[in-house]
Amino acid sequence: MKNLVNIQSLSTGYRLKRGKTRLLHQNLSVTLHQGELVGVLGPNGVGKSTLLKTLLGFIPALKGEISYGGTRLKDISVKEMAARVSVVLTTRIDDIYLTTEEVIHTARYPYISLVGKPSEKDLEMVKNAVLLTGIADLLHRKFYTLSDGEKQRVMIARALAQDTPLIFLDEPTAFIDSPGRVELMHLLRAISRQGKTILMTIHDVELALQFADTLWLLGKDGSFETGIPGDLINKGSINKLFDRGNVKFNSDKRRFV
């Protein structure tokens, strides 16, 4: 499999005043491969979103190296990054007064020429994204009128229209009801099977175990473990990560009891 992202000896956290730092995780080394659907799991507040934003360059790494296709993150321009990675963040967006179609078209900005006119390829990429996500009936509606689930599908369509090899999502199932979460995960897996690499933070452990190819486990003690879901279950890693005394993870049922 083709390596798209290489992470070497990465330390994540925040730089505070007077030269101090708040360290969340250190010495993370892992690779993202083409066509993988990867879920980042961990207790609330462990630093899942911080890791994602560090990989994107939104938050500077405290230490270590991040490279995309052999090019260091620090050497990649904003526009070049937009051609490599599309991003769907967890922030609720309620004030976009564009139509759904206009929102999706904004994804093509890394490719549109100086005259600003969409090319045939731009239009084709938008069309394909709409078909894959099944949102054709939403195109002429104002984005702010959509339900949370509909908005999430639109933002995923926008990410697809951006036509990047990598898609990063921060809690894509947030604000969505249970049937909608399952439907969304089926969509993400179908996208990954077309060769896209998807990295997502997710709080729904059972969904992650069902749909992800690989899991990255972040512990509150700074631990970091990767592997396929079945192996991590059998090793007891899932139960250890979310141990809350009376609540245990049942490895046979693949759910908490």
Image (cartoon, rainbow, N blue to C red):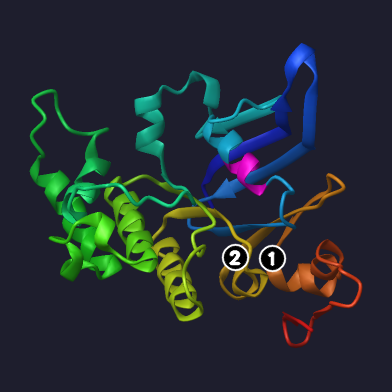
Q: Quadrant of residue 253?
A: bottom right
Number of numbered tags placed on the structure image: 2
| Disc 1: which residue | 228
Q: Is residue 49 magenta?
A: yes
Give the CA distance from mark 1 to mark 2: 6 Å
Instruction: Judge left or right: residue 223 versus residue 45.
Output: right
Identity of the residue furthest to the bottom in this view = 253
Query: Residue drawn 60% across and 76% down?
Result: 210
Pinpoint residue 82: horizontal percent, then vertical percent.
37, 35
Q: Quadrant of residue 208?
A: bottom right
225 or 25, which is in the foreground?
25
Pinpoint residue 104: horizontal percent, then vertical percent.
23, 50
Provide the secondary structure element on which disc 1 rests.
Answer: loop
- Which range of residues does the magenta coloring cover? 48-52
44 or 125, which is in the foreground?
44
Q: In the rendered view, would you say 208 is above or below 128?
A: below
